Image: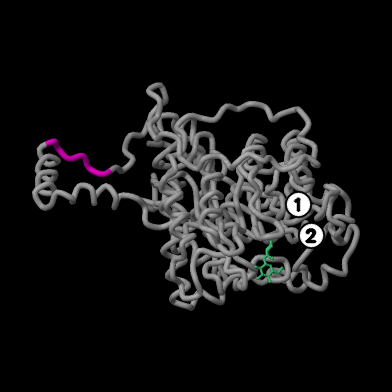
Amino acid sequence: MTDQSVSRPRRRGPRAALASAAVVALAAGTALLFASAASAATTLGASAAERGRYFGAAIAANKLSESTYVNIVNREFNSVTPENEMKIDATEPQQNQFTFGNADRIVNHAISQGMAVRGHTLAWHSQQPGWMQSMEGSALRQAMLNHVTQVATYYRGKIDSWDVVNEAFDDGNSGARRNSNLQRTGNDWIEAAFRAARAADPGAKLCYNDYNIDNWSWAKTQAAYNLVRDFKQRGVPIDCVGLQSHFNSGSPYPSNYRTTLSSFAALGVDVQITELDIEGASANTYRSVVADCLAVARCNGITVWGVRDCDSWRSSQNPLLFDCSGNKKPAYDAVLAELNSGAPPPTTAPPTTAPPTTAPPPTTAPPPTTAPPPTTAPPTTAPPTTPPPGGGGCSAAVYQLDQWPGGFVANVRVTAGSSATNAWAVTMTLPSGAAVTNAWNSQASGSTGTVRFTNAPWNGRINAGQSTTFGFQGTGTGSGMTPSCSAS
Ligand code: 9MR
C-alpha cells in the first residue's frame, strides 16, 4: 500500500469534536442515543454493502416506468438481475440475430444507479428459442458456445456475476444430469460453456446456478457440489455457485442451509443466494437465511426474486419483502435488522485449506434434528493482532480491452490483499491522446494522463482475497496501462 491519498472525511480537531458533543448533549439528553440508533443503515443495499455484500432483486424492464416499483428498486437494492431479459429466447430469438434492447434497459438503469448486475443466464435447457429447441448434437453445441460468447462479449465489463449454466441437474434422488438437448451434446457441455464465458468476459465471476441445492443431504446438492469440486480440481474456470433458494412447503428452508453454504465456500468459490423467495414470507425464515449468509465469509450476496408480491412468479404465495402496494412487510424489517446486526467482514484472509478430500455425507442421511445455529452475530471487535482494514493492500489488473478506431473499453478487477478493504483507489496512466469518457462501478477523477478511480459507495468493502470489478470507456487507444491499487 503505497498511495495514502484515498479520500477520507477530513479529521476534525479535538476542540471541534468536544464543542459539537456539547451542543448535542445540551440539545436533549436523548439526542446521543438517537444519533447512535440512526447510524444503522436504513436500506437493504446499504446495509449489505457495509458487510462487503450486495442485496439485489430480480427486476423486469417493462416495470421500470412504474414509479412505485422503480423507487423501491433505486432505494433498496445495490444489485439487480434481469428476470427474463437476458435469457436465450430474449437475446437470440433467431439464430445469430441478437436483441439486447430490454436487457440494455436494465443494465443501463443499473449502471446509472451504481448497482451491480447479475447476468442470467447463458446456457439453460429452458426458455430456449424455437430454433435452439429443435437442435441437437454438434450443431447445438456450436450454437450454444456462440451464444455464450456473443452475449458475454456484448456485456463485457458490465456484469458482476454470470449464471453461465442454469439448472443442469435432475430433480429427484439420482444426482444425475438433467436429460436435455444440451446434455445430449456431451457431458462436457458445462465446462465448455464456462471456458467460453471466461474467454469472453474475464472480469465477470462465473457461477453455476440451480434450485433444490439448499439442503446439504439432498442428492442434487451433492451432485452440484461434486461438479464444483471437480471443476476446481481440474482448473475449469468457476468462481461462484448460485443457490436459487425458492422456499415453499414442498422445498422448505432446511436447517442445514448454513452447512451447505459453507461447504460450497470451502471449495474456494463465492456463494450467492440468487432467487430467494419464501412462501408466506415468514420473517423468521428470511432472518435465518440472512444470518446464514452473513455467517459464511464467501456468501457475498443475496437476490430476492422480484420486488413486490404482485411482481413474483409465485404471486399467490406472497413470498417477497414488499406488498403489492409497495409497503415494507415484516419480512423486510427482519432482513434489514439481521443485516444491520451482522459483523463487518473479517479483516484477515480465511485460511486457504485444501477442499476436503473425504467423501461427502451419504445422500440418504436424515436431516439433522438440531435447531438451526444461533443468529446472533459474533463480536465486531477485531483481535489486536489483526491488521486494520486495508492494511493488506490490494491489487488491480486490467482485462481485455475492447478497441475500435478511436475508442476502447477496459475492465479492471480489484482484489483485496490479506485483509478486507473499506475503500480502494486505482490509479493508471492513460496513453497519450486517450481520455476516459465514462466509468461504471467506480468514480473517475481526471480524464487524461494519470486517472484515479475510487470505489463506488457499494463496492468499497472487499473481503480479504476477494475481488470486485469496475469498467470504463475511453477515446483514443487504451493499450499498455499498468494499474496500481491502494486500500484503506
Ligand atoms: O420469474 C421468471 C418468470 O417470469 C418466467 O416466466 C419463468 C420462465 O421460465 O422464469 C422465471 O424465472 C426462473 C429463473 O429464470 C430460473 N429459476 C427459476 C425461476 C422461477 O421459475
Circles 2, 1 touching at the beta carbon (< 8 Å): yes
Answer whether residue 325 is visible to the viewer in this image. Answer: yes
Position above or below: 373 against 472: above
Q: Position of residue 393 (x, y in %)?
A: 44, 32
CA gap, disc 2 to disc 1?
8 Å
Which quadrant holds residue 231?
top right
Does the magenta portion include 11? yes
Of the 4 image quadrants, the one containing the C terminus is: top left
Taking the spot 8% from the left edge, 49% from the top edge, the residue there is 26
| Range drawn in magenta | 9-14
Q: Earlier in the sequence, mark 2 or mark 1?
A: 2
For mark 1, does the 10 Å Cα neighbourhood hold few (<14), some (14 to 19), or many (20 or more) residues?
many
Judged by its main secondary structure, the magenta piece is loop
Q: Position of residue 249 (x, y in %)?
A: 68, 60
Answer whether residue 438 is visible to the viewer in this image. Answer: no
Position above or below: 46 against 371: below
Q: How is the image coloured?
A: one colour
Mark 1 is on which residue type? Answer: Ala
Q: Which residue is mark 2?
A: 144
Mark 2 is on which residue type? Answer: Met
Taking the spot 61% from the left edge, 48% from the top edge, the residue there is 205
